[in-house]
Amino acid sequence: MRYHIWTVGCQMNVADSHKLGAGLDRLGWASVESPEDADLVVLNTCSIREHAEQRALSKLGTLKKLRRQGKQFKIAVMGCMVGVNSDDLQRRFPYVDAFARPQQFEPIMEAVGHEDLGGEFWPATFETPDGPTAYVPIVHGCDKFCTYCIVPYRRGRERSRTIDDVYAEMAHLAARGVREVTLLGQTVEAYGHDLDGTPDLGDLLRAVHDIEGIARLRFLTSYPKDMTERIVAAVAELPKVCESFYIPVQSGDDAVLERMRRGYTVAEYLEKLELIRRAVPDVAVLTDLIVGFCGETEAEFQSSYDLLANAGFDKVHVAAYSSRPGTIAHRELADDVPQDVKLARLHAVEQLETGISGGINGRLLGRDVEVLVEGRKAAAAGDDGAAAVAERPWFGRTRGNKLVHLTGDVAVGELATVRIEHTSAWSLSGHTVPAPVTAAT
Ligand code: SAH
Ligand code: SF4
Ligand code: F3S
């Protein structure tokens, strides 16, 4: 039997898709590139913004058409579009064979005749790596209930995996060639508070640090309020943990942060940033920002803009606010910033950020950085297939998670030293050099 999994959304969804794939592989199924060749097509969906849902809906439309043309595959919809109750989805999409909430793969298995899998099947199924990097979820769900956000309603309450379980999965991945693991949680510092002995993220990082073959550790996403000195100290002390934090600010204005119920002020956020930068020299900091949230005035937006202009983030993911049915903001606040204003603010931030990222990356010109080689750059339109493969540059990432295109005699999974010869706001490029790494970025 053959399966095809289509994935949108965050790293959690990518990890879930890999896990489902690993389970199907264990049952002797094979993965195929095209839905038309599959017996089972799974759409792993995201609800974070309306646009993400629209992508899944248009994909469903395509599948429905293929079915009408006589294709026999089963269709399963999983992930964050599926709520506790899927009656409404079932009514809207009667041709879908199974709806599965995030990580609840059972309905999909039932639809393909595997209602017999024991309770041990999924916990003993570890993600199958498809390269030298992998994501490992360590805490599922979210308890924060930021007013704009759908995630807690779709992924449920926080549940941590035990250190032993995470260790076993990472050892499994290392044995299959993985060199870099990113530990995942919606608020990754929440790790462990529900476990015996309440270990924290720092304890987990220490515990998995000795796994042979793993050269780099990362973690995301950080929740500013929960970031502790103890965790930052572990990051500073452990050589495999990369100098990179992904710590969303969401707004640079206290009144907006309060309407979002983020639980911190701008000053408190900046204190955490300072704590990180003091302890971890050369650290790269990524953040998320929402523009056009309910009631955001021009002055409130300006506060966000000014924060970005001063904080020196390596990268900002900016999104226009999208009201999500079921959230507190959808119920209690008016989505009153006009779409054209949201987009103008989005573009202003993007433009500002291009300049800032370009400047920060420019400082790496001429320096030697450590790059984990992940593969060859994808073919550009017009390349004539296999003959061109050997000509394409390699790509990989620095410890600061910056994309690098490189030339030189390297292999996938290798830690190369690259002298940076060209930089832009989006990537770096250069050639390998034999010299030892001097820069951590
Ligand atoms: N757990 C992470 C983020 C998860 S969602 C955190 O707490 O920061 C990923 C990003 O999507 C968020 O950081 C936010 O910037 C954005 N986002 C979430 N809900 C949104 C909404 N309703 N409209 C626009 N962007 C949203
Ligand atoms: Fe959503 Fe807030 Fe939880 Fe992040 S912390 S997933 S933004 S509710
Ligand atoms: Fe989307 Fe769910 Fe992730 S809503 S961003 S796939 S947690």
Image: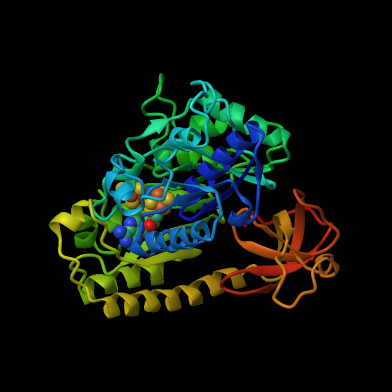
> So how many labels did they put on this image?
0
| Quadrant where the image shows the N terminus | top right
Quadrant position of residue 329: bottom left
User: Residue at 60% of width from left, 56% of height from top?
Assistant: 36
User: Residue at 67% of width from left, 57% of height from top?
Assistant: 439
User: Which x, y percent locates residue 213?
Assistant: 72, 36
**Whether residue 214 is situated above or below residue 314 in the rendered picture:** above
User: Which x, y percent locates residue 143?
Assistant: 30, 39
Q: Is residue 224 visible?
A: no
Image-based side of 6 in relation to 344, left or right: right
In terms of depth relative to the viewer, which is nearer, 18 or 37? 37
In terms of depth relative to the viewer, which is nearer, 14 or 291? 14
| Quadrant where the image shows the C terminus | bottom right
Image-based side of 172 in relation to 261, left or right: right
**Whether residue 189 is situated above or below residue 425 in the rendered picture:** above
User: Which x, y percent locates residue 359?
Assistant: 55, 74
User: Residue at 29% of width from left, 56% of height from top?
Assistant: 267
